[in-house]
Image (cartoon, grey):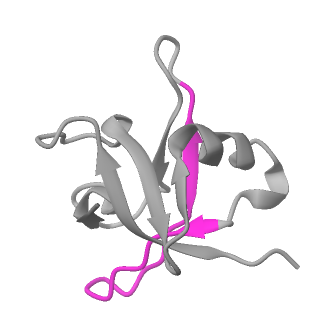
C-alpha cells in the first residue's frame, strides 16, 4: 500500500504568482522538501497518483496533486478538480 503525503508549504519563483506553474518547491508534513521536477517524475508512475494531497479544513476536501504537461514550457503541478475558486496549492504557506 502506498502512503500519501500532505503538502503543507510551497515556494514560488514569483511572489505575486496566480498560477501553480510558478511553484518551484513543495514541503511535506514532516519538513521533507522536493522540487517540482522531483514530484512530476514521481507522478509519472500511475500508482503514485494519490501520493500527494492538499488538505483544506474550510472545504473539508483533500484533492490529490496531478502533473500538467503544457505543449510548451516545463511541467508543473496543480490540485485535481475541486470546488475551491483557485488552486488550493496557492493557499498554502510559503517557505
Question: Toward the viewer: 81 or 30?
Answer: 30
Residue 67 in magenta stretch: yes
In the image, what residue occupies the spot 19% across and 36% down?
A: 14
Q: Quadrant of residue 82?
A: bottom left
Would residue 14 be found to the left or right of residue 24 on screen?
left
Quarter holding the N terminus is bottom right
The residue that appears at 63% across and 44% down in the rendered structure is 38
| Residue 57 screen position, x and y as percent | 32, 88
Query: How far across and how far down the image is residue 81, in percent?
Result: 45, 57
Quadrant location, the C terminus = bottom left
| Residue drawn 83% across the image and 59% down it | 47
Q: Position of residue 89 (x, y in %)?
A: 35, 59
Q: Main secondary structure of the magenta part?
A: loop
Q: Is residue 7 above or below residue 42?
A: below
Q: Residue furthest right?
A: 1
3 is within the stretch colored magenta = no
Q: Report the residue that reaches farthest toward the top.
A: 72
Instruction: Please state the extent of the stretch shown in magenta in the rendering.
Output: 52-69
The structure residue drawn at horizontal position 32% and vertical position 51%, both measured from the top left corner, is 11
The location of residue 67, given as percent across then percent down, is: 58, 42
Q: Is residue 77 above or below residue 82?
A: above
Amino acid at each position: 500500500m502506498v502512503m500519501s503525503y500532505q503538502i503543507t508549504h510551497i515556494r514560488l519563483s514569483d511572489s505575486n504568482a496566480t498560477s501553480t506553474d510558478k511553484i518551484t518547491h513543495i514541503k511535506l508534513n514532516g519538513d521533507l522538501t522536493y522540487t517540482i521536477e522531483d514530484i512530476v517524475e514521481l507522478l509519472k508512475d500511475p500508482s503514485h497518483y494519490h501520493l500527494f494531497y492538499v488538505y483544506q479544513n474550510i472545504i473539508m476536501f483533500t484533492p490529490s496533486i496531478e502533473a500538467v504537461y503544457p505543449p510548451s514550457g516545463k511541467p508543473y503541478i496543480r490540485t485535481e478538480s475541486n470546488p475551491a475558486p483557485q488552486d488550493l496549492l496557492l493557499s498554502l504557506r510559503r517557505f
